[in-house]
Amino acid sequence: MHRTFVAAWKVPGDGILPALVLTGSCFLAGGLAGCLLAAQVGGAGQTSLTSYLQAFLQASHQGAVDVPALWLQIWDSLRWPLMALLLGFTALGVLGLPVLFAVRGFLLSFSIAAFVRAFGGAGCLLALVVFGVGGVLSLPALFLLGVQSFLSARTLAARVRGEGSGHVLWGRACLIRCAMCLGCICVSILLERAAVPALLTGAAGAFLRQS
């Protein structure tokens, strides 16, 4: 079992760091765009967004926020890793994966920035509870699948151009890595369903008492 686990991480070293830098840079660029957009929201848009978040916070304090249906939460957690995985089966993943990571970074950072802008420093804690508990496992899984898929898509793109016949990273080791990522995502879903509602209720109560 130990040998199988170790072998699963023997991805060809050539190109791993550039692929990680590329996906990470796209994620950060999307995150920066999300922060800038959140900072530019003003007037009626800012008022509506703040009112929505305050209502959400009040409902969380009262325990009136319903836990999403399980299948909706599964889809919400799996859609990004699944898209990253599927893009590795096509040469178009060379372009699609950077876009995917930029969009993911944009949406995540905009949501976090909205909390911070609405509630100040306390918004960081609230955003950490809402997005950080599950993200601490789901984001690393996304990056692992994204890097693996980008290496495979790059090899496929080289074959299309007739420039090489490198090894496409799909096989037993890939399946093991995918299974481990799926395990992380499942744990993330369980944490979001079991821990986040209680943590959010406590954080919302502490914030409302101070405000």
Image (cartoon, rainbow, N blue to C red):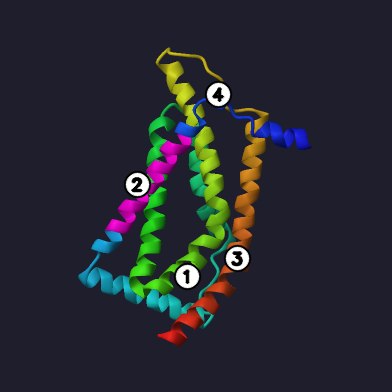
The kind of residue on which mark 1 rests is Leu
Q: Is residue 59 left or right of residue 48?
A: right
Q: Is residue 6 left or right of residue 88?
A: right
The kind of residue on which mark 4 rests is Val
The residue indicated by pointer 4 is: 168
In the rendered view, tell whether residue 167 sits above or below residue 52: above
In the rendered view, tell whether residue 189 sits above or below residue 183: below
- Pick the residue in front: 34 or 92: 34
Q: Residue at x 63, y 61 (%)?
A: 190
- In the rendered image, the quadrant that contains the C terminus is bottom left
Give the label, 4 or 3, closer to the camera.
Answer: 4
Rendered location of residue 17, percent (x, y)? 49, 33
**Label 4 with label 2: CB-CB less than 8 Å:** no
The residue indicated by pointer 1 is: 125
Give the label, 4 or 2, closer to the camera.
Answer: 2
The kind of residue on which mark 3 rests is Arg
Label 1 crowding class (10 Å Cα cut-off): few <14, some 14-19, many 20+?
many
Q: Secondary structure at mark 2?
A: helix
Q: Secondary structure at mark 3?
A: helix
Rendered location of residue 163, percent (x, y)? 43, 13
The residue indicated by pointer 2 is: 29
Q: Which residues are magenta?
A: 19-36
Among all residues in the image, which is located at the extreme right? 1
Closer to the chain start, of discs 1 and 4, is 1
Rendered location of residue 92, percent (x, y)? 41, 29
The residue indicated by pointer 3 is: 193
Among all residues in the image, which is located at the extreme left? 43
Give the label, 3 or 1, closer to the camera.
Answer: 1
Q: Residue at x 61, y 45 (%)?
A: 181
